[in-house]
Image: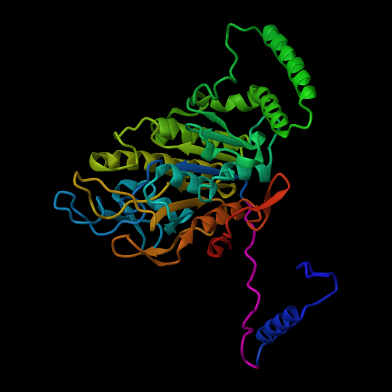
Amino acid sequence: MPETGRKHAGVTSRRDFLATGALGALGASLPGQPALCAEKTPIPRGKAEHVIMLWLGGGASQIDTWDPKRRGDPKKKVAGSAYNSIPTAIDGAGVCEHLHRSAPLLDRAVLLRSVHHEVIDEHAAAVNRMHTGRPTSGTVVYPSMGSVVAHKLGKPAEAIPPYVLMGYPNLTRGPGFLGAKHGFIYLTDTETGPAGLRRNPSISTLRQGRREALLGRLRKSYLERRRGDAAVRDYSDAGIAGLRLAGPEFMGAFALDKEPASLRESYGSEFGQRCLLARRLVERGVRFIEVAHNLNFINGTGWDTHNEGQRNQHILIRELDKAFSTLITDLEKRSMLEKTLILISTEFGRPPGFDGRGGRGHQSKTFSLVLAGGGLKSGQVVGQSDELGRKILTEPISIPDLFATVYNAVGIDPASDLYAGDRPVPLTDQGKPLGKLFA
């Protein structure tokens, strides 16, 4: 019979025998010498239970925030940071002067200064990269980080969603092949909550009950006609879950007026209020919350600081500083910081040079993110960039490594699989957690 390539149980090929023998020889220690293939100490799994992602859409400049360099001058086209650097609670690490509230709290955080990927010019592709951990695919719709965390950690309770998005929905933030039941609940209004979950005051409880009963009968009839259709079943389950969310257990989180006025003031404007809501959602057990910054484009361009957008970038940085610093202290006072991982993320960074109108272009080969809380070994910097933040000098952090680190922090095995139907799909694209962040 021709060779099929299938290995029979109990049969060892000559190639396998030689390979095993070679590995054994390398692994054996010579007198006074360590084993060449000694097994690495396994990275301990984290114990965080929640993730809050603060999303800086547009591409935040690393040298104007978390990795400042020498001062530049846009008028003279001298490359460099737009602001002065100030010291932080991390020895030897400075940040932008507009992050003065966060600076003394960074012993609770980790500065990742060597993040990189290959997408440069296309925002949508870079946003997809930073939400799914994968390049855009024409054949597979990969799930977002939020959907993976929701899928792996599960619902905290029937009336609480595992994944909430405070921003505008799109496919990149969705469940991909995991299906609708692992998708997000989204909202843009912190006072009223998700659209459609709050009953219109003109509809009585009795009338609402009758409507739900009719909907239930229609749903049952349709499902009976479409038996075996997993997509229809998932969509139906998502609708049923939505009705459960309309109760006070979840909707009570949106009563921000119950918080002290001084705390609300400390969080700041609309972005800060969304961060406060994120804390209230964590208290109710929500697993993953994405909070989009600058939905109102308060500086005119958002973090996409081409041309004149650079001029008012400090407004964004100050707003981020106020909300982030208050979120850290608020979680800490409630003994929630160790169980909550905060990730400040963006699609890419910015080069040190200025364009013709004083702004900056795109740069993905070196940029910075921040992790805080989550039980990590904090108060450190991972990675070093060159004198102008153009190139990575030490400890490059790939996007798969970033995702593996976040998953490991919340107790998810980064080496595990997801399933697209019956087909196993690795959780990350060969990512490895940053071992130095786990004690």
Q: Position of residue 136 (x, y in %)?
A: 51, 47
Is 46 inside the magenta-drawn segment?
Answer: yes
Q: Is residue 132 above or below residue 15?
A: above
Which sits in the foreground, 24 or 139? 139
Which sits in the foreground, 123 or 301? 123
Residue 437 sits in quarter: bottom right
Q: What is the quadrant of the N terminus in the image?
A: bottom right
Q: Is residue 337 above or below residue 388?
A: above
Residue under the image location 45 percent in, 66 percent down: 395
Q: Main secondary structure of the magenta part?
A: loop
Q: How is the image coloured?
A: rainbow
Residue farthest toward the front in the current orientation of the protein:
1
In-image side of 39 versus 336 (left or right):
right
- Residue 336 visible to the viewer: no
Q: Which residues are magenta?
A: 31-47
Which sits in the foreground, 191 or 64? 64
Q: What is the quadrant of the C terminus in the image?
A: bottom right
In-image side of 145 versus 368 (left or right):
right
Q: Position of residue 289 (x, y in %)?
A: 54, 38
Residue 288 sits in quarter: top right
